[in-house]
Amino acid sequence: MSLEELIKNCINGNRKAQEQLYRDYSRVLYSVCLKYSRNKTEAEDNLHDSFMVIYDKIDQYTFKGSFEGWIKRVTVNTVLQKYRKEPNLSIVPDHLEAEVEVESEYLDIGLQQLLSYIQELPNKYRLTFNMFVLEGYSHQEISERLGTSTGTSKSNLARARIILKERIESDLRQNAIL
């Protein structure tokens, strides 16, 4: 079945088509969810919620542009909407805007370890970091999606980088001692 047929069958509520869509795209969307979640369990919940939204809104896909890009965008928006509802996604002062340089010695850490550090960030920092660094959103787009100011977006990014840098340095020092 072609992608267009698959999408049309999903629009018509065909369960087999929805199952096929899940099999075809769950790995890609799970990796997106992992970037924005604190752990694997939360990523799985976010993946489930995202597919429910995708099935509900698939009729809004206009067959223009990449379908995978569209479902990734739906997934990111679903996860962000969930975190916006949490009371601890608070606004921080706009005064932390300094860029943090990443030194080459930090490049020795593995991708899994870096992902683990990112997942440990508080929601507001993790979401901003992922949207800016991993997804390529501008601070204006981030502020619109999270309901904050662009200054807060910049501040949250700077704070996330500081926390990550401190965490990496701490682990590097600890590993050097061992």
Image: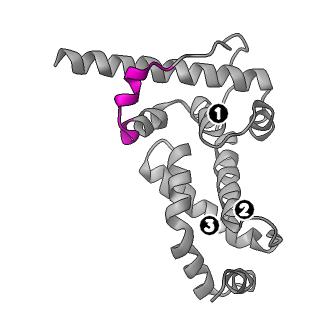
The amino acid type found where label 3 is placed reads Phe
> Could you tell which of marks 3 and 2 lies nearer the N-terminus?
3
Amino acid type of the residue tagged 2 in the rendering: Trp
Image location (x, y in percent) of residue 27: 49, 63
What secondary structure is marked by label 3? helix
Identify which amino acid the numbered label 1 is placed on: Thr
Look at the image and give the residue range highlighted in magenta: 102-113
- Residue appearing at x 67%, y 27% in the figure: 90
- Residue for point 73% across, 71% down: 56
Examine the structure image and report whether residue 105 is included in the region drawn in magenta: yes
> Mark number for residue 68?
none
Q: Is residue 91 visible?
A: no
> Whole-Å distance between the Cαs marked 1 and 3?
23 Å
Identify the disc placed on residue 51.
Answer: 3
Q: Which quadrant of the rendered structure holds the C terminus?
A: top left
Q: Which residue is mark 1?
A: 128
**Residue 63 location, quadrant:** bottom right
Q: From the image, state whether disc 2 or disc 1 is nearer to you.
A: 2
Residue ID for mark 2: 70
Q: Is residue 85 left or right of residue 36?
A: right
Name the residue: 50% across, 30% down: 121
Label 2 to label 1: alpha-carbon separation:
20 Å
Badge 3 local density, few (<14 within 10 Å), some, or many (20+)? many
Secondary structure state at the residue bearing disc 1: helix
Where is 68 relative to 38, above or below? below
For the stretch drawn in magenta, the main secondary structure is helix
Residue at the image position 63 percent from the left and 50 percent from the top: 79
Label 2, residues with CA under 10 Å away: few <14, some 14-19, many ≥20: some
Q: Pointers 2 and 1 in contact (CB under 8 A)?
A: no
Q: Decide which of 61, 54 is in the foreground and name it.
A: 61
Q: Disc 1 vs disc 3: Cβ atoms closer than 8 Å?
A: no
